[in-house]
Image: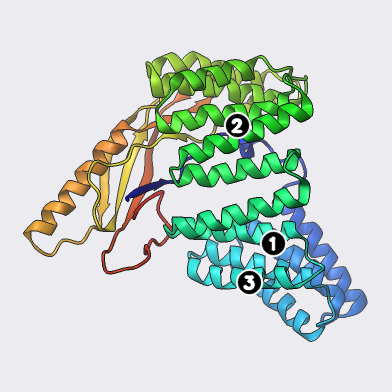
Amino acid sequence: MLRWLALLGLTLALSSMPAQAGDPPGARAAAADRLQQAEATAGPDSPQVIVPAIDLAAALLAEGNADGAASLLARASGLLDRYPEQDRALRLRVLILQSDLLVRLGRLADSNKVLYEALDLSRRATSISPLEQANVLERLAANEGRRGRATSASSYVSDALALRGKHFGKDSPEYAAALLRAADWYRYNGNFRLEVDAEKTALAILEATFGARDPRLAIPLIRLATTRIAQRAQRGDAVAAMDRASALEFGPGPEDAYIRAEILATQADLHVVFGKPGDGTPVYAQAWRRIATHEQLGDAAANQYFARVRQLFVSAPDVIANIGTINLAYTVTATGTVDDVRIVKNAVPATDGSSQAARSDAGSAMWMAMRRSRYRPRVVDGVPVATPDLRFSSEFCLDPTQFLPICTGGANASAVR
């Protein structure tokens, strides 16, 4: 069976919200101060240096400073070797950050080796909680998913979910949050049935805990709608979910303003994917104003929230090559459709006439698939705008000589068996 693994812009991009608890430069400066103080009071090779060194490495990695993070992690690892009586949880932190660093460098197989060591440690050390073990499993799932290895990734997701259910209880809000994280994987893997099941279960847990009108139900309701958007199917279910989300009892705070804006924007998305794309334009403007007119937010916050296009429905190509990559450039119009699609690179191998034809067919199919795709446009000062010269890469990992997929993990979508 072929799978089209499309890394969609998963629905509730509240990560677009301005940070509430300090920015990475502030975190880096504070960590650097703590490290300097530890070095001054206890010496550069003392065990007191380990924690601030790890904290600074994490801050540097968040900023994208891979070299600085790598140096500090090596230093912390060396000190942990020197002082083996230190809490094993510190070693786990180092391993997780090292794996994240390797992912950033595109070295997924090496990242997995580090995560296997972390998983073994988390299972042996009594000071490490099941939640930390679940974090490792979720990272392994993400890596395996990028590599196109859906079966092993699904196993890691299931194991992580079971650990969180055992720790928190399967009727807890924390377990509901874990279900929504698992739903991210199910969507990436194209398993919409399991995604919907996870979202409906999370919704039921939150409703039983907080009541039928609580705004915390908004996230799974939005997720249910965007699942249908990503499928381009069952529009009625998506509309019903958004109608229910709109009727929740929101408060006056800024977080609720963001969620109400997301509900409106998702309603606009429904027009883009299922109806007349232009009908979404005034609804996107209304969503932007929901943030802009909030007394604690304003125009700048609204522009930041809608600063990037968001994938809604990514069409799979009708023809899929065995191996290789195809890179496209395209424009997302102000109404969310796709225009000006260009093949920037077609690296599907072609050694003879038949393979040359297959290469051309795969390129044409990707071009047409991109034209069918739909996006949420950027919104600037209340007006949806076009975004030119975007990039989309697809990777084909169907080499019949390989037992497992050979995806590099660097593409927006991958075709695997």
User: Label 1 is placed on what type of residue?
Assistant: Gln
Q: Nearer the viewer, residue 219 or 203?
A: 203
Q: Earlier in the sequence, mark 3 or mark 1?
A: 3
Q: Residue furthest bottom?
A: 82
Q: Position of residue 76 (x, y in %)?
A: 74, 75
Q: Residue at x 48, y 37 (%)?
A: 193
Q: Position of residue 326 (x, y in %)?
A: 29, 52
Q: Nearer the viewer, residue 120 or 348?
A: 120
Q: Position of residue 253 (x, y in %)?
A: 77, 24
Provide the residue designation for mark 1: 133
Badge 2 marks a residue whose secondary structure is helix
Provide the residue designation for mark 3: 70
Q: Residue at x 70, y 72 (%)?
A: 121
How far is disc 1 from disc 2 in space, using C-alphas?
26 Å
Q: Which label was assigned to residue 335?
A: none
Which-is-in-front pick, marks 1 and 2? 2
Q: Residue furthest right?
A: 41
Which-is-in-front pick, marks 3 and 1? 1
Tell me if residue 68 can be seen: no
Quarter of the image with the C terminus is bottom left
Instruction: Characterize the local packing of mark 2: few (<14), some (14-19) or many (20 or more) Cα atoms within 10 angstroms.
Output: some
